[in-house]
Amino acid sequence: MSDIELVIRSSKKLEGLLERHFAATGRGLHEKVSSVERRLPEALVRKLRFIATVRNRIVHDEGADHIDDRAGFKEACAVSEAQLRKLAGVRVGGKWRWWMLLLGIVLGAALTIYFKYFH
């Protein structure tokens, strides 16, 4: 895979995660990160900005056709993706747990009323 293909695929994947799980908005990775950066850890924001900067340099600068630190870029992408997926899972899992707790309270109250008055 070429460096250009690597940066585009990686950026698109991260942008998609930000859009789907964090409702990020904007035209590129920098703008999407800016729209949700208050909800992300600072270290993750720095990694995402690094990825966006490398992507913009490779895509827009005429003389740039390779990633200076390919291994570092790939690591930043992998770590960022894992952290975004983990944060998204915590948010979804947290919401699920609240619904289950609410359901348990309602069912518990209904059973208490049933056994107290109708049994």
Image (cartoon, helix red, strand yellow):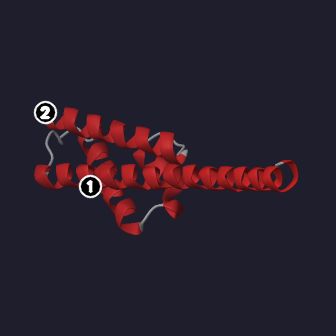
Gap in angstroms between the C-alphas marked 2 and 1: 21 Å
Q: Does residue 50 appear to the left or right of 97 in the view shown?
A: left
Q: Does residue 50 appear to the left or right of 65 in the view shown?
A: right
Residue 77, position in %: x, y? 26, 49
The single residue placed furthest to the right in the displayed view is 117
Instruction: Please tell me which residue lies in front, 29 or 21.
Output: 21
Residue 33, position in %: x, y? 46, 52
Q: Does the image show residue 97?
A: yes
Within 10 angstroms of label 2, few (less than 14), some, or many (20 or more) residues? Answer: few
Query: Is there CB contact under 8 Å for labels 2 and 1?
Result: no
Q: Secondary structure at mark 2?
A: loop
The residue pinned by badge 1 equals 79
Q: Secondary structure at mark 1?
A: helix
Instruction: Please tell me which residue lies in front, 16 or 91.
Output: 91
The single residue placed furthest to the bottom in the displayed view is 42
Residue 79, position in %: x, y? 26, 55
Mark 1 belongs to which amino acid?
Val
The residue pinned by badge 2 equals 2
Mark 2 belongs to which amino acid?
Ser
Please identify, in this view, whether the residue under mark 2 or under mark 1 is nearer the observer.
Answer: 1
Residue occupying image coordinates x 18% and y 49%: 74
Within 10 angstroms of label 1, few (less than 14), some, or many (20 or more) residues? Answer: some
Residue occupying image coordinates x 71% and y 55%: 108
Asked if residue 53 is positioned above or below residue 4 in the image, the reply reads: below
Q: Earlier in the sequence, mark 2 or mark 1?
A: 2
